Image (cartoon, helix red, strand yellow):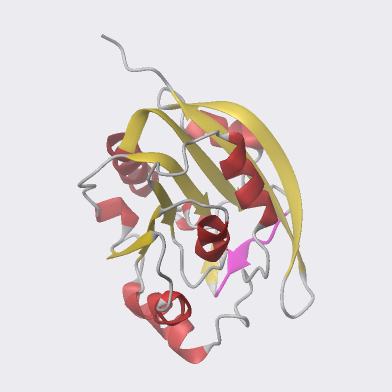
Amino acid sequence: MAQNSDHWNDVYKQRAPTAVSWFQADAQASLELIAATRARLDGPVIDIGAGSSLLVDGLLARGYCDVTLLDVAESAFLEPKRRLAGRTTGVVQYIVSDVTRWKPERKYAVWHDRAAFHFLAKEHERAAYRTALASALEPDAHAIIATFAIDGPERCSGLPVQRYSADLLAKEFSGILEPVEERSELHVTPKGSKQSFVFVRFRRVPLRA
């Protein structure tokens, strides 16, 4: 199995959402890149490896009203479900699944992934991810994928990761996605460590007739 559910459930049970190394009080880069897609506010957005991220809160605050969170760890959703329990606007759906084994049941206008893809060390895992992504995207959809940059950490949460440049990410998704925009981000963890990320915003390659 590409993603170990026991490992990630333990992570979210043992650490507060604000204590994990990938915590962001403000997912500014992701929100700006999602806005740049010009997707309609009622267009479905999916966050892959969402965990307990505050991205969903930021999306709902900006008027997006159809957001899906996918994560292999069911315990990751305890905190967002608590935070969002009182909301009366916007629909949030939760999917507990390994993205490499997930069979999408609907299409999405925006696919977002910050720090999930880089855990897929084997080519067959990445191929399965690409299959899920391709089957989940609307014809004119966008995807935002962020990983550790070439000078980023070699491990995260005790697991090895793959590091990428924008060009390497583009090669991974060649034939499915075409790059539109890239940016770098220096993320500071709750413990003060610095981690280099690369973000790439892609557009779905038009399907051949």
Query: How many numbered badges does the structure rendering display?
Result: 0
Of the pair 135 and 118, the residue shown nearer to us: 135
Describe residue 74's horizontal placement relative to residue 187 as left or right: left
Where the C terminus falls, by quadrant? top left
Front residue of 65 and 110:
65
Most distant residue in the bottom direction: 14
Q: In which quarter of the image is the N terminus?
A: bottom left
Residue 199: quadrant of the picture? top right
The span picked out in magenta is: 152-157
Q: Nearer the viewer, residue 66 or 25?
A: 66
**Which residue is at 74% across, 45% downward?**
184
The answer to whether residue 148 shows anywhere in this view is no
Give the vertical position of 49 relative to 38 (above or below): below
Q: In this view, does 49 lie to the left or right of 74?
A: right
**Residue in the image at 65% along x and 31% along y:** 181
Return the x and y of residue 172 as percentages of the image width and height. 48, 34
Q: Position of residue 165 (x, y in %)?
A: 66, 39
Residue at the limit of the structure toward the top, as seen here: 209
Q: In the rendering, at what x and y percent does residue 179 appear?
A: 57, 27
Quarter residue 84 falls in: bottom left
